[in-house]
Amino acid sequence: VIYLALQIADNNRILKSQSHYNALALMQRPIELMLESESLSNAMYQCNRAPYEVAEPIWPRCSRYYFIAVNGWEYAYYQNLDEAIPSELWVGSDGYWANEAVTVPGYVRFWEEASLAYGEQFRSHVEKSIQQNPSYVGQE
């Protein structure tokens, strides 16, 4: 019984470590994409500042970038609820992404178009930040 308890504890530690790694990898991927591609960086610069004014072929690329980024935020959100990642990782990552949602107009357009791709619980969490963005007009 003691041996089994030790095995379970070790397994839980390994799973938590893997969840931590997965969260970091998912949240770093958008940064890696920007570093790897000058054209993506240029497109995101435009989309971040004036998402409704970008040329038609640019927005879909930006939208997919936001999707990847928000998926990382979502993963961390649910891993935090499951206590599968350190709370410090959650606090830092949530603070970063919430700040992006509050300050970057591109996230508002993305959220208007894609929020239904996310579950209600996470959607409500993100909307608290989106609604603070000066670009947000709301759904009346």
Image (cartoon, helix red, strand yellow):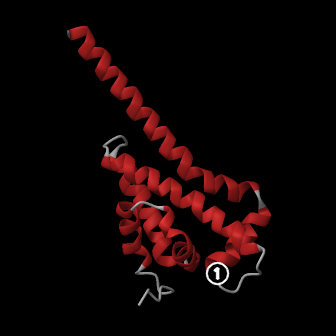
Identify which residue is drawn at 55% across, 48% down. 26
Pick the front one: 81 or 33: 81
Q: Secondary structure at mark 1?
A: loop
Identify the residue shown where x is 70% and y is 74%.
59
On the image, the x and y values in percent for residue 58 come to 75, 73
Q: Quadrant of residue 106?
A: bottom right
Q: Would you identify the image quadrant in which residue 130 lies?
A: bottom left
Where does the image place residue 125, in percent across and percent down from the top left? 36, 66
**On-image quarter of the N terminus:** top left
Q: Is 31 left or right of 10, judged from the image as shown? A: right
Q: Quadrant of the C terminus?
A: bottom left
**Which residue was labeled with disc 1?**
51
Above or below: residue 123 compared with residue 80: below
Residue sitting farthest toward the left:
1
Numbered circles on residues, count: 1
| Left/right of residue 78 with respect to residue 38 in the rendered view | left
Residue 124's place in the image compared with 22, above or below, is below
In the image, what residue occupies the spot 62% across and 56% down? 30
Q: In the image, is 4 to the left or to the right of 73?
A: left
Q: Is residue 65 above or below residue 79?
A: below
Q: Quadrant of residue 12?
A: top left
Residue 50 in percent (x, y) is at 64, 84
Q: Position of residue 11 (x, y in %)?
A: 36, 23
Q: Amino acid at mark 1?
A: Pro
